[in-house]
Image: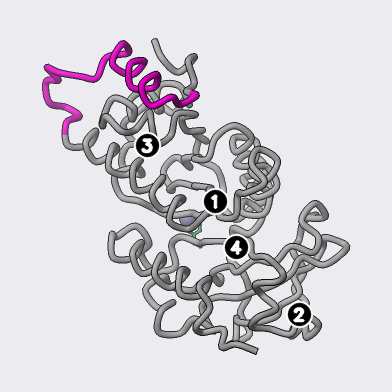
Amino acid sequence: MENIYEAAFVKEMEKTTANMYRLGWDERNGGNISYRLDEQDVQKYLDTDRVIRTIPLGFDAEELAGCYFIVTGTGKYFKNVTEDPANNLGLFRISKSGKDAELLWGYEDGGRFTSELPAHLMSHIARMKADPENRVVMHSHPTNTLAMTYVHPLDDKSFTHTLWTMSTECIVVFPEGLGVLPWMLCGTNSIGEATAAKMNDHRLVVWAMHGIYGAGKSLDETFGLIETVEKAAQIYMLTAGLPQVNTITDENLVELAEYFKVDYRKDYLG
Ligand code: 2HA
Ligand code: ZN
């Protein structure tokens, strides 16, 4: 058995949470990450027959039965993951019934997965249908993205369009745009269902006055998606209220999308 502390998936979780903390996106226990792993990869480090604890999920995740995830813990701080991964992270398998998490490693102080697990697992289900390679769901509180939700209308089309015009690369990085949810109570199955519904055709979902969800193939790709949105939101917040004398036009956006051959949401223009 190899040492799990050396596993690429643990190292990547450490690196990603540390970066997100450093950027000021994940104060205190803000933010959470779930990363779907292959059984063969997990078996290099753990005996998958040795279940430490069974933790009820509180919702039905039967579509993910047998899937393995490494997930940040509830109440845990991104700031502390690198120095103590076994307390701040947990690795579990979804039981056959889809009703429980079978803990194989981590949450060593008796803890459990993030309170936002419904939104994570429901988003995994939605994104895996859109793209079976999807492995990561990431939630964070990036400052400018959050600020923007206080001063900008909250519909998918206008929010996306504004961000596309705030930086040339945006339409290339997230051509399908963003889904935007109004303020909702977090940690609930309802916000999970609403997030997953937007995840059917977006990899990014904004939670107004709270933060953002991203989904992708890898931690790097998903982090990069959120980072690009946050940069564009920063440009928006730096220029909002100033007389805007230049912009990226819809013609420019079409030119970009065609040159980089991305399938963009044409109905988000205009
Ligand atoms: O886990 O970010 O949305 C802390 C949060 C809740
Ligand atoms: Zn949050």
Q: Are marks 1 and 3 in contact (CB under 8 Å)?
A: no
Of callouts 1 and 3, the N-terminal one: 3
Q: Say which residue label 4 marks.
A: 115
Amino acid type, label 1: Lys
Of callouts 1 and 4, the N-terminal one: 4
Say whether mark 4 is within 8 Å of ligand 1. yes
Cα–Cα gap, marks 1 and 3: 27 Å
186 or 260: nearer the eye? 260
* Residue at (28% x, 65% y) in the render: 22
Cα–Cα gap, marks 3 and 4: 23 Å
Q: Say which residue label 3 marks.
A: 149
Nearer to us: label 1 or label 3 = 1
Residue 149 position by quadrant: top left
Residue 158 position by quadrant: top left
75 or 16: nearer the eye? 16
Neighbour tally class for label 3: few under 14, some 14-19, many 20 plus, Cα within 10 Å:
many
Which quadrant: the C terminus?
A: top left
Amino acid type, label 3: Thr
* Residue at (49% x, 29% y) in the render: 176
Q: Where's residue 35, x and y in %? A: 58, 62
Mark sitting on residue 217: 1
Of callouts 1 and 2, the N-terminal one: 2
Q: Where's residue 264, x and y in %? A: 47, 23
Q: Say which residue label 2 marks.
A: 48
231 or 68: nearer the eye? 68
Q: Secondary structure at mark 2?
A: loop
Which quadrant: the N terminus?
A: bottom right
Q: Is residue 243 magenta?
A: yes
Cα–Cα gap, marks 1 and 2: 24 Å
Nearer to us: label 4 or label 2 = 2
Cα–Cα gap, marks 1 and 4: 23 Å
19 or 172: nearer the eye? 172
